[in-house]
Image: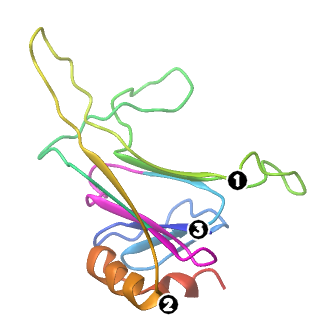
Amino acid sequence: MFSLLWLGAVALTAGVPPSASFDDDLAFLRQHTIGLSPSRATGVLGSWDADRRVLTIVRYTRAAGAADYVNSMWEIQKEPYRGDVLNSYNDGPPAPGAKPLGPFYELETSSPAAALGPGARLTHVHRTLHAQGERTALDALARKLLGVSLETIESFSR
């Protein structure tokens, strides 16, 4: 299984991990962690499990003009508000030959960082849809919501 992250019209070229493949608008990941900044995230991401025929779609609210997101790295931060709006983590062996910690994966979104005063509110909505069924129906759903076919997704895992 691997995750597909929809990036809009952005291609990542620097620091590409060996377990990832990148196309013009897509990042295909296997056993890796990646985060996308607010300028690269589009509001939708998903994953495809071909063995179980499960298409997972995540849609989330994107605050217009928001640039500050909490940096979730586990270290003292020089820029604590230069974090990612979304993260994908696919479990895999922590080292060659080691057993994975899972198996599991995460598709995670974050709200913008906000110092809210008394009575102030910020709403962030994260919706996860797991669709399981006939391949033709799931392919139509992937094309409509992610803009890519299941065949294209699977071509990156070969």
Q: Residue at the far front: name it.
A: 133
Q: Which element is circle 1 on?
A: loop
Q: Is residue 37 left or right of residue 153?
A: left
Q: Nearer the viewer, mark 2 or mark 1?
A: 1
Q: Residues within 10 Å of mark 2 (few under 14, many from 20)?
A: few
What whole-number distance in Å separates the C-alpha atoms at marks 3 and 1? 12 Å
Q: Which residue is mark 2?
A: 151
At x 33%, y 69%, the residue is: 10
Q: Which residue is mark 3?
A: 2
Q: Amino acid at mark 2?
A: Glu
Residue 77 at x, y = what percent?
47, 24
Is residue 67 placed above or below 58 in the rendered structure?
above
Residue 73 at x, y = what percent?
52, 32
The answer to which quarter of the image holds residue 18 is bottom right
The stretch in magenta equals 36-55
Is residue 156 placed above or below 27 in the rendered structure?
below
